Amino acid sequence: MSRYEPAEIEPKWQKAWDAAQVFLARRDPAKPKYYVLEMFPYPSGRIHMGHVRNYTMGDVVARTKSAQGFSVLHPMGWDAFGMPAENAAMERGGHPRDWTENNIAEMKGQMKPLGLSIDWSREIATCRPDYYGHQQAMFIDMMAAGLAYRKNAVVNWDPVDMTVLANEQVIDGRGWRSNALVERRALTQWFFKISDYSAELLQALDGLTHWPEKVRLMQANWIGQSRGLQFAFETVSAPAGFDRLDVYTTRPDTLMGASFAAISADHPLAKALEADPAIAAFTALCRKGGTSAEEIETAEKIGYDTGLRVQHPLNPAWELPIYIANFVLMDYGTGAIFGCPAHDARDFEFATKYDLPIPSVFVAEGQADAPLSEPFVPMKSERVSYLRGFAGNPLQTGEEAIAAAIAHAEANGYGKSVTNYRLRDWGISRQRYWGCPIPVVHCAICGVVPEKKENLPIELPYDVSFDKPGNPLDRHPTWRDVACPKCGADAKRETDTMDTFVDSSWYYARFTAPHAATPTVADDVGYWMNVDQYIGGIEHAILHLLYSRFFARAMHKTHNLPLKAIEPFNALFTQGMVTHEIYTSLRPTSGNTPEEKLRSLHRQVYHLPEEVEGLLPGVEPRTFLKSDVDKVIQMYPELDRLGAQTLLGRQDPNNVDFPRVYVTPSAKMSKSKKNVVDPMNIIAAFGADTARWFVMSDSPPERDVEWTASGAEATFKHLTRVWALSTRIGEMPADHQGEGDDDLQRATHKAIAEVTAGIEGFAFNKAIAKLYEFTNAVARSSASTATLKEAIRTLARLMSPMTPHIAEEIWAAQGGQGLCAQAPWPKADPAMLVDDTVTLPIQINGKRRAEISVPKDMPASEVEKLALANEDVIRFLAGQPVKKLIVVAGRIINVVV
RNA sequence: GCGGGCGUGGCGGAAUGGUAGACGCGGCAGACUCAAAAUCUGCUAUCGCAAGGUGUGUCGGUUCGAGUCCGACCGCCCGCACCA
């Protein structure tokens, strides 16, 4: 071996792995299985450092499990439908399919050099008919099972692009592409009945013990269970069919504080009243407002008094007005509320505005009537005296008061206990081309008819144009106009396509039999599912993961996922982002001479790290070195990073186009801030092993990691040192006898134990720290050649999940059998993990004062004697009597005086 | 507003209630060199010449012993939010 040349060894070993089919997943009944999956990427065209971190983590797990004797499934695919492809077609011409397939080829070409242990024979892309055809089959099954249905729903409608927009795509009330004012429009759309599973999806969270607590909480909040009372008001002089008004409340104990009733503008009663032009105008006004969070927050509460009245359930003579109010949501509860301004901030605001009474139910001792939002112990109030004695409790807490109020309503027949969920059915219709076609036909005679399964896949037509706004499927007659599958009459295909979240809701199951003629195959699902370890970003904590949990259940119900345990992901790990400092400067906007330029207006521009750090050869203009900044900060601790940079920055009149560069703190890599490091550049400069090691080394994997040029260089230097160490050991005479063999063997076994524990505990940074320590131990050792060779082979094996290529090279050079990637994981001998002598610190009253070395199995009484005889201990005790002596075996001694 | 998390050197971060700061970055010094780079070696929480003192956001508590457990406060970050 000569120099460490990753560019030579990395492709060589990748070829060797491919030739030996090392990563081919095989169903092997003799072995336990392990399914590790990283969230599959959207094929944007280029991989970024976030991908490198995500897939390296999965790769470390996959390679380690494989070495530990598991039959491993570690696949990769493409979440390939979605709007960017259509936008590219609209902006630059071309076809979404070509754009997507090119990107897939491009990104695959970038992922291969990373040396990931992926079974590429299982590659899938959701935009290909052999994937989405099965999705269509399952959609038909879901229709039959009542899990997919059509209903009218209010959506954001862009009148220029003629499509539905997601809330995130509405900016200041305007479409993000067209800039047109967005309308709220009621459309008939397809929904999945996820709400059928609200209770189960919530309850099953308790069993996901290997999921982050944070994600489970976020999902629980999203499902949003609440318990309360549903009851009916009798209406006074309402239109026919509306003699009762159902309302839902979580605070039935405040019923005596009622001041008004309010209904949503979309409530059937409000619609019935729209014959009145004033009411029609008001409900139209309510619907105009957007649905984004900001708009809701700033929207004023407005109401319209319908003139109708309801009777209070506890006193029919007490009549309350019915308002139509913009803040009442039709799709939560019953779409109608009773207002209790004394104990609800929102109702208080409304009542104040419309001058409605504010009767208090609960009054804190010694206080005047005031709004109280917390459930309140109602013992002081006359207005809840009717609740005493209900639910067999003395109403000591707000919860008891609520329970008593529900019991009272049920006993007196005016209401019942109801559990409500915030979770709404999943609207999956998109008026887009580049998605999975919904496989139904609209027939004038038969209505909505599912496509026959033998006609699947319903493929997207290729001959479409994007020169007009709207969905090209709508204006594609030969694709759109078909015969009804049922009666044969002229009919039209559904032209909506499915939300891309549907595609990613079952891909994990498809990976178990990616080329099968059915969506899944029982034997394969039975062997591989569930995913043992899922790894991805926290940004999918709710939508993707909740949809997947629902879809697994829907597939199970429709016999497409023959499993007992229907949670798709046994363990979830959410990894942090890769960040980088942002380099920015002010650039003159006009002027020909340097002086004119200096005096002109400046605009803020950003610089790529390569420009500033001078990492790439040939990229010159750098006004400072980052190490200089660090030096200045060291000298002047009161300066911050920006201050140090200002101090260093020299305004060079001859180079005003590249003036002072300011550094702002590390943030997620983004194109707009230019703080991106291209993994391909890193691989070209240092190799894949360096990139892989660095993204795993510095920070705990769940936290953000800052990419730094110095860190990458340091990693490369370390790998070079390991290389040199291996070379040195390789050149030693085979029969050389040295010293300290036992120490090195113990260090080796300790490294095995600690690195293994680090990897298994998802503490890759700690595993790598132990590898540094072990490397130093081997480098310092003067043991005999045989022991050193054994140590460096173990080092290579332990490094291999992180840096598989250099590990393979060292393994081969040091006489390892076969491929390192196929060698068994080393086992630590417990006897080698304890030293013969241990150093015990001695504390006096909890302060460390001395230490002694004792044999590891010395009895406590002996240790006590030795400790008290220690001269430092005697000095610090200064003759004081010892009150207590605590000896923690192998740990510490504490003398109490 | 509701829910959750986190505060440790110049920086990223280690520490089953048991020697705080492993490991890495940065820095300093030395070796090699005419010199520089590269490489190697050593040092690097802080005050102090030393002995020793002080230190894990602040204040209190539990304990022989607290970064770790408990209570209050301060600060930062994240998620949700007109959900009746």
Image: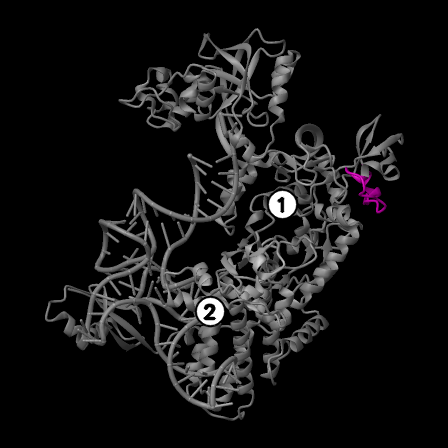
Residue, x 63% and y 9% (percent of image)?
A240
Specify start and end residues of the magenta stretch as a single range: A451-472
Amino acid carrying mark 2 in the image: Asp
Task: Label 2: state its secondary structure.
Answer: helix
**Residue indicated by mark 2:** A628
Tell me where residue A328 appears, x and y as whole percent.
Answer: 55, 24
Amino acid carrying mark 1 in the image: Ser
Image height of A297 relative to A320, above or below: below
Closer to us: A155 or A117: A155
Label 2 Cα crowd, 10 Å radius (few <14 / some 14-19 / many 20+): few
Closer to us: A841 or A180: A180
Q: Is residue A410 visible?
A: no
Colour basis: one colour
Label whose residue precedes the other's in the sequence (2 or 1): 1
Label 1 Cα crowd, 10 Å radius (few <14 / some 14-19 / many 20+): many
Residue, x 65% and y 13% (percent of image)?
A277
